[in-house]
Image (cartoon, rainbow, N blue to C red):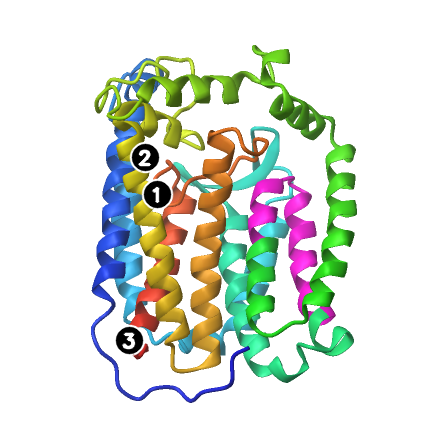
Amino acid sequence: MFKWRQKAQSKHAPDLILTIVILALLTVGVVMVYSASAIWANYRFNDSFFFAKRQLLFAVVGIIAMYGVMNVPYYFWRKYAKPILLICFLLLLAVLIPGVGMVRGGARSWIGVGAFSVQPSEFMKLGLIIFLATYLSIHQKYITSLKKGFLPSLLLVFVAFGFIMLQPDLGTGMVLVLTSMVMIFVAGARISHFIGLGLLGLVGFAGLIASAPYRIDRITAFLNPWEDPLGDGFQIIQSLYAIGPGGLMGLGLGQSLQKFFYLPEPQNDFIFAILAEELGFIGGTFVLLLFLLLLWRGIRVSLAAPDTFGSLLGLGIIGMISIQVMINISVVIGLIPVTGITLPFISYGGSSLTLTLFSVGILLNISKYAKI
């Protein structure tokens, strides 16, 4: 789909619209983390600002990282794609070692670093995007070949997916696979290959669900959450109880009722439910419009990149963020089963927020070279 293009020699300021949207989403996130977590933080830590202060710290670190990366030429990452991917795989291996990896919510997905913790699977998402952008831009002429292009690209994706599923973390694995599929598709892969892969993927996905009883329970809770309202259906029921009363204008910032120990840890995956309850349909729509603007601008910047690597790298980054947004909000409003995916820029979480800001820093650098 893309043809190789040479790097541009001149650059300009990063895309202003993209920058404003990123900072607007980040601001909404910090405010909503405080609003959603204040009651829980005061009860647990005797400090209503506990989560908000940490989120603000993550945001500051992320902005510094974003600014630094924004000034690194995007083609720098092509040179170090292999070492970056290797480090990501080593981190995924380390998290599986008892005593190194930390178990949260039934998954061994974290590595403790002092008073904080990092989630290696978050780094793998970006590491794989960088490597695939490099590989596909070099071997693009083979992408229409099943054996020479399509399958070799998929092999690495599913190896990474396999490591993540050992934790297990199906939600992050889904984002990684879907993002990779987007990149392989726009690189020019045949649709017929995707149809065959899709059929195989459905069988594999069904196997993954059947292999873990808790995933079957999530499917059952999704189909009829009121069958087990105090168990597997509890989160989605409480989420809908938050969204419903929000109405058009919302109950007002800080006035959520569901954050009073009804919706578990509301500052995390289900923060959009609290946002909809307090800011209503208008507030929720505003945030969705910001994400749509981010998607539109990200795609435009990527397509205007001066070379194939830049285009694929930008599309991978904006695809990763957009897929995560779609999955998270679909879960919150009850369209798909619970997956444990954060809402980019908005949900509480150090690894997710800093990695997202780091990623958009690369996208902003691409915008400095894009001809738009």
**Residue 264 visible within the image:** no
- Position of 324 relative to 238 (above/below): below
Quadrant position of residue 57: top left
The answer to whether the residues at label 3 and label 1 have Cβ atoms under 8 Å apart is no
Q: Residue 27 appears at what percent x and percent y?
A: 23, 42
Q: Residue 168 appears at what percent x and percent y?
A: 65, 39
Q: Which residues are magenta?
A: 151-176
Residue at label 2? Answer: 284
Quadrant position of residue 342: top left
What is the chief secondary structure element of the magenta stretch? helix
Identify the mark nearer the N-term, 3 or 1: 1
Depth check: give the residue in front, 98 or 51: 51
Query: Residue flagged by tag 2: what amino acid is it?
Result: Gly
Label 1: how many residues lie within 10 Å, few (<14), some (14-19) or many (20+)?
some
Residue at label 1? Answer: 288
Position of the C terminus by quadrant: bottom left
- Residue drawn at (32%, 77%) of the image: 370
Query: Residue flagged by tag 3: what amino acid is it?
Result: Ile
- Residue 174 in magenta? yes
- Residue 2 in magenta? no
- Position of 347 relative to 204 (above/below): above
**Residue 204 visible within the image:** yes
Mark 2 → mark 1, Cα distance in angstroms: 6 Å
Quadrant position of residue 138: bottom right
Q: Secondary structure at mark 3?
A: loop
Identify the mark nearer the N-term, 3 or 2: 2
Label 2: how many residues lie within 10 Å, few (<14), some (14-19) or many (20+)?
many
The answer to whether the residues at label 2 and label 1 have Cβ atoms under 8 Å apart is yes
- Residue drawn at (31%, 58%) of the image: 65
The dot on residue 313 is: none
Q: Is residue 243 left or right of residue 151?
A: left
